[in-house]
Image: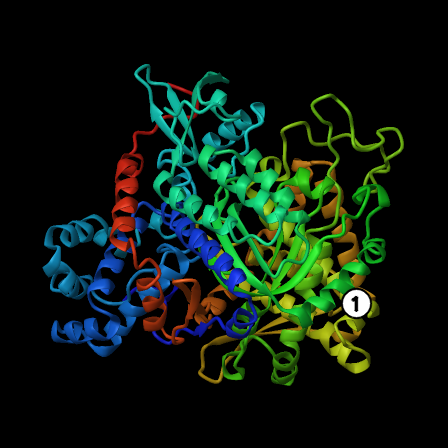
Amino acid sequence: MADTQYILPNDIGVSSLDCREAFRLLSPTERIYAHHLSRAAWYGGLAVLLQTSPEAPYIYALLSRLFRAQDPDQLRHHALAEGLTEEEYQAFLVYAAGVYSNMGNYKSFGDTKFIPNLPKEKLERVILGSVAAQQHPEEVKGLWQTCGELMFSLEPRLRHLGLGKEGITTYFSGDCTMEDAKLAQDFLDSQNFSAYNTRLFKEAGQDGKARYEVRLASVLGTESSVDSEVTSKLKSYEFQGSCFQVTRGDYAPILHKVVEHLKKAKAYAANSHQEQMLAQYMDSFMQGSIEAHKRGSRFWIQDKGPIVESYIGFIESYRDPFGSRGEFEGFVAMVNKAMSAKFERLVASAEQLLKELPWPPAFEKDKFLTPDFTSLDVLTFAGSGIPAGINIPNYDDLRQTEGFKNVSLGNVLAVAYATKREKLTFLDEDDKDLYIRWKGPSFDVQVGLHELLGHGSGKLFVQDEKGAFNFDQETVINPETGERIESWYRSGETWDSKFSTIASSYEECRAESVGLYLCLNPQVLEIFGFEGADAEDVIYVNWLNMVRAGLLALEFYTPEASSWRQAHMQARFVILKVLLEAGEGLVTITATTGSDGRPDARVRLDRSKIRSVGKPALERFLQRLQVLKSTGDVAGGRVLYEGYAAVTDAPPECFLTLRDTVLLRKESRKLIVQPNTRLEGSEVQLLEYEASAAGLIRSFSERFPEDGPELEEVLTQLATADARFWKAPREVPAGQA
C-alpha cells in the first residue's frame, strides 16, 4: 500500500455541517435568495477541478457517473462480489468523498496528492463492471482509461501541487517555470491587469520563441462583439522579447450557470446594495472583468449586517504556486446573532486596539474603516475547502480606502476543531484537559483578532499613476533603519504581485502574530466573556495551540524541494521559530519515546514567561513584518521570512527528524458534509446528510439533479481541450528560442 502521506485513512473524521436552526429562521424570500446563491456557488466550485490537476475533472466525472447509477450501498454489493474486502471498499468511499470534499485529488490543506488505498486492478473491476459501465460502456471505459493511471500515480513531480519540476498545477501549462510566472506577472503589472481570474499557457511559436496566452475566466469569448472595458485588451502584446496574447472564455459553460443563478437571486435581494453587487458580479463573470468584481465588492462592503451573507469569485491565491491567481470560491451563510454581538464589541474597540500594535502610526491606515464582523452559520461553501474565518475582499486598493468585512464561520469551527483526548498529540498529559476545555473559546478569540486586526491592519505605501504618494516622504521614518522610506508600491503593483510566492504565508503569519499579541489584552478577553483565571487559561491555550500547530506544520514541508505546501502552516512554523529564538525556556520541544515504543515528542510552553519573554519577541518580529510589507521591501521580506521558514536538522530541535515523528503520528483533516437546498414550487427545502463518507458522496450525487451528466460532459470537454498543455511538454526557456 501507498505511503500514508498519500492516502486518506478509513477512519478519517467526517462531520455534518449543522445550519438547521439558522436556516429555519429565514423568511421564504431569504430562503429563495440563499438557494440561488448556493446554486451559483456550487456551479462555480466545479471550476476548481480545472484549477487543480489535469486528471481531476475526469475523476470527478467518473465518480459522479458511478454513484448516480448506484448509491454507495448498492455499489458496495457489487464491489464485494468483485472480490473487494469491506476495508478496500471503505477506502474507495473515503477516496471518493475526499475528491468531492477537496474538489480534486489534491488536499486543499497541504496541496498533497491522495490516491485510492486499494489495488488499482480491483478498482478497475468495480468500475468496468458497474451499472454505470453497463449503461454507458464507452464513456465509463474512456474516463477510466484517461484518469486511471494518473489517479494512482505517485511519480515524484505529481505528489504535490507546484510549478515546473516542483509539482503539478493547472494554473500554468506544464512547461511553465517560475521564471515564466515572474515574466507573466511583470507583463500583467505593466498593463494594470489582475492575475486573479487568469491562467497562463505557454507554447513554442513557429519561430521557436515562447508565446504566452493569458486566459481570463468569462462566459464571453474573444470573438464577442460586445464592447466593454475588457474587449480592448484582448489582443497580442510584445513584452521583453516575448509575445503575450490575452484571451478570455475560460470555464465559460460553468460561469454561464453561475450567472443564471445570480440573476435569479437578484430578484430576491433584500436591498439595492445586494442588487448592484450581484449585477456587477454577473458582469465580471460575463466579461472576465476584475474591475467589475471590485465594483461588486464595494457594494458588498456597504451591505452591512445582511441576514444572508455571501461572496463569490476568484478569491484566495494560496494554491497558485506563484501566489497571484485566485481559486474559485463561493459561500452562503446566515448570521449567528449571539456571537456576532461579541464581534461587534470587538469592532467598536478596534481603533483603540490598533494603537497597541508595535509599529509607528504612519504605518497604519490613515483611517480605520469600520467593517462588518459577523459570526455566520454556513449553508454552502463551494471550493476546495472551508476556512474558519475570512477577511475579504483581497483587493489591496479597496481594503486601504473603502474597507472590508470579517466573518467567523461558527458552525465550521464547531465541527472542524473538536478534539478527542486520545488523538491529542505532542502535549504533556497535564496540558491535555485544559487544552480540550479552552481550545474552542481561545480559537474564537484568535479568529476574531486574526481577521479583524490582523488582516485588517497595516498600511501599504503607494505611489499612484499620477506620481502622488499616500505618505509623507519627508517625515515618515523607517523604524528599522532610522532613515526615510526608500521603497514603496508603484501603480499596478499589489502585495500579491510583489511578494508572490511568500505573500500568502507572510500575511497569514502577520495576522496570526497580531492575534497572539492582542489576546494578552484584558479588554479583548472581557469582550469574549473571560476574566481572571479563565482569561489566563484562554491566553495560555491560545499560545500553546500556536506552538503545537508550528510543530504539526512540519507535515506540510517537503525536504526534497525545501518548500512549504500550506501557507497557514508555514506561518505557524515561523511563529514557533520566533518564540523558540526568544529563549529563556519560553518554548521547548523534547523528543521522547511513546508508550508504543515509537518516536514521539512533547512541546511545552512556560506560561509564566508569555508576557515577559514571548510578548517582546513577538513585538520585535511584528514590527519588522509590517515595515517590510508597508515599504514593499521584497528583498528584505524574503531574507526575514525565508530565514525563519527554513527547516534544518540543527540541534537542539532537529526539525527534519521531528518531521518524521509528526508524519508518524499525524491525524488527517476532517471531511465536512454540507447540505443541499431544493426549490419545490415557492418553498426551499433543506436536505441534510449523515456524517460519513457515504453521506458526503450522496450530498454530491444530489447536488446537480437537473444537469449532472451535462456538467460532467462540460468538464471533460474543457479538460480535453487543454490536455496538450500537460502532455510531454517541449521545454522552451522563458522568452527565448
Residue 653 visible, this orientation:
no
Residue 700 visible, this orientation:
yes
Q: Does residue 731 appear left or right of residue 261 in this picture?
A: left
Closest to the observer: 488 or 412?
412
The percent coordinates of residue 109 (x first, y second) are 48, 58
Q: Does residue 594 appear left or right of residue 294 in this picture?
A: left
Give the residue type at disc 1.
Answer: Val
The percent coordinates of residue 282 (x first, y second) are 49, 40
Query: Dot 1: few (<14), some (14–19), or many (≥20) neighbours within 10 Å?
Result: many
Which quadrant of the figure has residue 299? top right
Q: Does residue 720 appear left or right of residue 506 in this picture?
A: left
Locate the N terminus and report the quarter of the image it occupies: bottom left
Closest to the observer: 222 or 8?
222
The percent coordinates of residue 468 (x first, y second) are 77, 25
Q: How many marks?
A: 1
Identify the secondary structure beneath mark 1. Answer: helix
Q: Residue at x 38, y 50 (%)?
A: 46
**Looking at the image, is 480 positioned above or below residue 566?**
above
Q: Residue at x 72, y 64 (%)?
A: 343
* Residue that badge 1 annotates: 524
**Looking at the image, is 17 positioned above or below residue 245?**
below
Locate the C terminus and report the quarter of the image it occupies: top left
Which quadrant of the figure has residue 721? top left
**Looking at the image, is 680 positioned above or below residue 438?**
above
